[in-house]
Amino acid sequence: MIGRWQAVVIDCPDPAALASFYEQLLGMQRIEEENDWVMIGKAPEQPGIAFQRVPALRAPQWPDPEHPQQMHIDLLVADLGEAERKALALGAHRLEDGGVEDGVERFRVYADPVGHPFCLVRE
């Protein structure tokens, strides 16, 4: 082992605002906060998600390779419909239907308030 995973880091124009979105979406708490950096997680000693300020962020546009994703998170959920309602209420917006396997919808693709894609995936 060379190191331990600390965080997934997401570029964004306002770290505090995007951290708030993901805190509510994932049930996490603020672990660290500075002017240009916020980290959230379940506990300080566990890996988390960090948000760093990039003032001139070029927002991703799913699935256009000219505007890359910059990151992608999959969230396991018990009920896609209920999870979608809650994510949309927090400020997410739906990008596409996602994937169907054996006639069952397995995931849906969304964007966070800044435009980063993420998926809600059926458990």
Image (spheres, grey):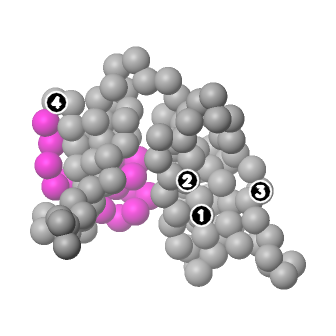
Q: Is residue 42 above or below residue 38?
A: below
Q: Secondary structure at mark 2?
A: strand
Between discs 2 and 3, the one toward the N terminus = 3
The N terminus - image quarter: bottom left
- Near mark 4 (Cα within 10 A), the count class, few <14, some 14-19 or many ≥20, is few
**Which residue appears farthest toward the top when viewing the image?**
56
In reply to whether residue 83 is colored magenta, the answer given is no
The magenta stretch is 20-34
Kind of residue at disc 4: Asn
Report which residue position mark 4 lands on: 35
Q: Secondary structure at mark 4?
A: loop
Kind of residue at disc 1: Leu
Report which residue position mark 2 lands on: 118
**Which residue appears farthest toward the right when viewing the image?**
103
Between discs 4 and 2, the one toward the N terminus = 4
Report which residue position mark 3 lands on: 97
Can you see residue 15?
A: yes
Q: Is residue 69 above or below residue 49?
A: above
The C terminus - image quarter: bottom right
Specify whether 72 is left or right of 61.
Answer: left
Q: Secondary structure at mark 1?
A: strand
- The Cα–Cα distance between marks 4 and 2, rounded to whole angstroms, is 25 Å
Q: Nearer the viewer, residue 67 or 113?
A: 67
